[in-house]
Image (cartoon, rainbow, N blue to C red):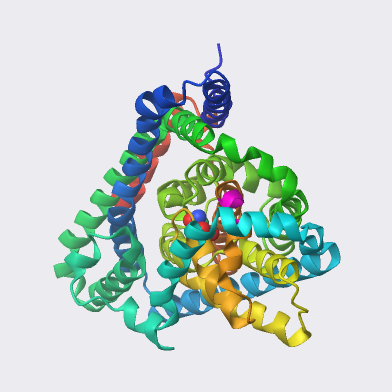
Amino acid sequence: MKKLSLVAKIGIGMVLGIIIGLLGSFFSFEQFVIDWIKPFGTIFVSMLKLIAIPLILVSLIDGISNLTDMAKLSRIGGKTLGLYVTTTVLAISIALILANVVNPGAYVSPEKREQLKEQYASQAQLKQDAASGVKDSGPLKLMEDIVPSNIFKAMTDNGNMLQVIFFAVLFGIAMIMTPSEQMKPVKGFFNGVNAIILRVVEIIMKYSPIGVMALLAGLIVETAADASLFVALGVYAVTVLFGLAFMVFVFYPIVLTSFTKIKYKDFFKGMFPAQLLAFSTSSSAATLPVTMERVEKNLGVSEEVASFVLPMGATINMDGTSIHQAISAVFIAVAFGHDLTLADQLVIVLTATLSSIGAAAVPGAGLIMLVIVLGAIGVDPAGLALIIALDRPLDMCRTIVNVTGDATVATLVASSEGELSEGIDPDDLTHEEKLEVQVTESDVEEFK
Ligand code: ASP
């Protein structure tokens, strides 16, 4: 009998999680699900986060130290940043067109608006408080924050990925500049550790169907009470979902098929487990180890490119978040009776770009940064109360777009650098074939 693929197993985990969650809410055994099932999901997310920083550090040093040409590194950096900003601005523009055409804010009655404002006022206040630190910082704060003063401290916080990237790039460049005889053992060390970390990711992924099941079951029993809101805020939610789906099913396929030789079907098949995890965890950072594994192995992006482009993307490139911010800003503004001018819309493009860059790759971060977008167009940030209850399900969907956007840019950069090879799907290989691939890979390393 053919063994089930990982995607199929995760899919079964998701369905089971949804069924358990719905049964739990329906037959009122929510507490049982929260006490006895949800912890397996939390453990799964912790394991993914656990490996994220070591993975970024080691694979980036390993990738950069193999570079022979320093100019290539700055070229890859330039292309990456350029593509990240361009795709984000395009995503926001698409979102604004959608928001203006559909105008979801017009569908909220003043009574509903007041009711939501009152009901979610305290939660909205918490988000505003969280955003206040960001609002008060200077224009070069982002740059300042990238340079760590203590690398060990930086590595203790998953929110400091850019600092770890900075250190790894510096270290990698210094390795290239050091005589190769001295570097041989160091290179071998990072290469070996990198291989071990990738194995750890594989092991964690074996547990992913159970993790996903537990995460979804827990989420559903905790949020089922808010389901009625989907009806009240339906037009808004559908507009956001449409914008997100447009990116995944139209925008990225057009970009990929126009500029690379990869077939979108293969891209999608390769990325599907990462997308499912993005949906289940609502965190690009937690999904990163799997995104990196899939992009390298299944899509054939070289380690050099993937290890640089993807961690950076998880931190600064959030097309899904920016779409959500643009549509939500227009929605709240209209619901509060503001007339948005063209200048306001341009301000949304600018602030949503910056705030999606600044948003952390964790659940709910985009909503906090929305405070800044609203403030910039003169809308009361208390308006967050209108959309707060729907944030988690929309966050799950926008995180899929964030992760897919990162993988798209990694594929584009790799293709433009001649660093995109034929990917293989380890799921499609027999055990013997997998061993053969491993042997071939280590042979190549030895040969080098
Ligand atoms: N959850 C998103 C991510 O991790 C960020 C957000 O939009 O809240 O990519």
The residue most toward the right is 101
Q: Pick the residue in front: 427 or 56.
A: 56
Q: Is residue 15 above or below residue 291?
A: above
| Residue 227 magenta | no
Q: Which of the 4 quarters of the picture holds residue 346?
A: bottom right
Residue 389 drawn in magenta: yes
Give the position of the N terminus as an image quadrant: top right
Q: Is residue 294 left or right of residue 55?
A: right
- The residue depicted at 29 percent of the width and 79 percent of the height is 147
Q: Is residue 350 above or below residue 213?
A: below
* Viewer-side residue, 252 vs 258: 252
Can residue 309 be seen from the camera position used here?
Answer: no
Q: Residue at x 77, y 84 (%)?
A: 341
User: Residue 448: where, in percent of width, then height?
Assistant: 31, 57
In this rendered view, identify the residue nearer to me: 274 or 43.
43
Where residue 367 sits in the image (x, y, percent)? 53, 62
Q: Which residues are magenta?
A: 387-391
Q: Is residue 124 left or right of residue 100?
A: left
Instruction: Measuring from the top left, give residue 2's x and y in whole percent.
Output: 56, 16
Pinpoint residue 175: horizontal percent, then vertical percent: 23, 72
Q: Residue at x 27, y 74 (%)?
A: 176
Q: 321 above or below 265?
A: below
